[in-house]
Amino acid sequence: MKKFFLILLTLLSLAAAVCAYIYLSGKTAFAASFMSGALFGIFLMNIIVFSKNKKINSYARELEKESVISTESASRVKVLEAKIEVLEKALENALKK
């Protein structure tokens, strides 16, 4: 919804710049065109930044998932190593008896 709103504002700003160029003259046209162009640029950059931030957040979530999976795998390995040590000690004790 936010992206749609920003696109709508960008198009309205562009339309205002075009109307100012066509219907106004002199300093008024320059000021209106400048303000409309500035707003158009701001809204356009906001859309681009919003899109980039969305991609960065999804990438960060993906990295976090991979980190959790690798941590989980590492802890499974530690548990298995501990179980092997216990079984080795039990085998040694059984062979001694």
Image (cartoon, rainbow, N blue to C red):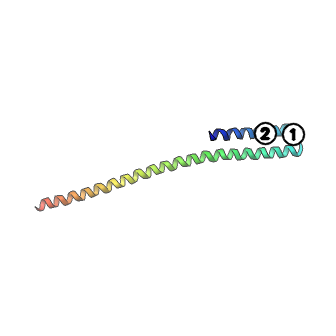
Q: Would you identify the image quadrant in which residue 23 lies?
A: top right
Q: Position of residue 54 (x, y in %)?
A: 57, 46
Q: Which mark is residue 16?
A: 2
Residue identified by numbered label 1? 24
How many numbered markers are drawn? Answer: 2
Q: Residue at x 62, y 46 (%)?
A: 50
Q: Residue 15: horizontal and vertical position, in percent?
A: 77, 37
Q: Residue at x 48, y 50 (%)?
A: 63
**Could you say which quadrant of the image residue 71 lies in?**
bottom left
Which quadrant is the N terminus positioned in?
top right
Q: Tell me the CA gap for discs 2 and 1.
A: 11 Å
Q: Going by the image, does 42 lie left or right of 79?
A: right
Outermost right residue: 26
Residue at horizontal 37 percent and vertical 52 percent from the top: 72
Give coordinates of residue 44: x percent, y percent. Answer: 69, 44
* Quadrant (top left/top right/bottom left/bottom right) for the C terminus: bottom left
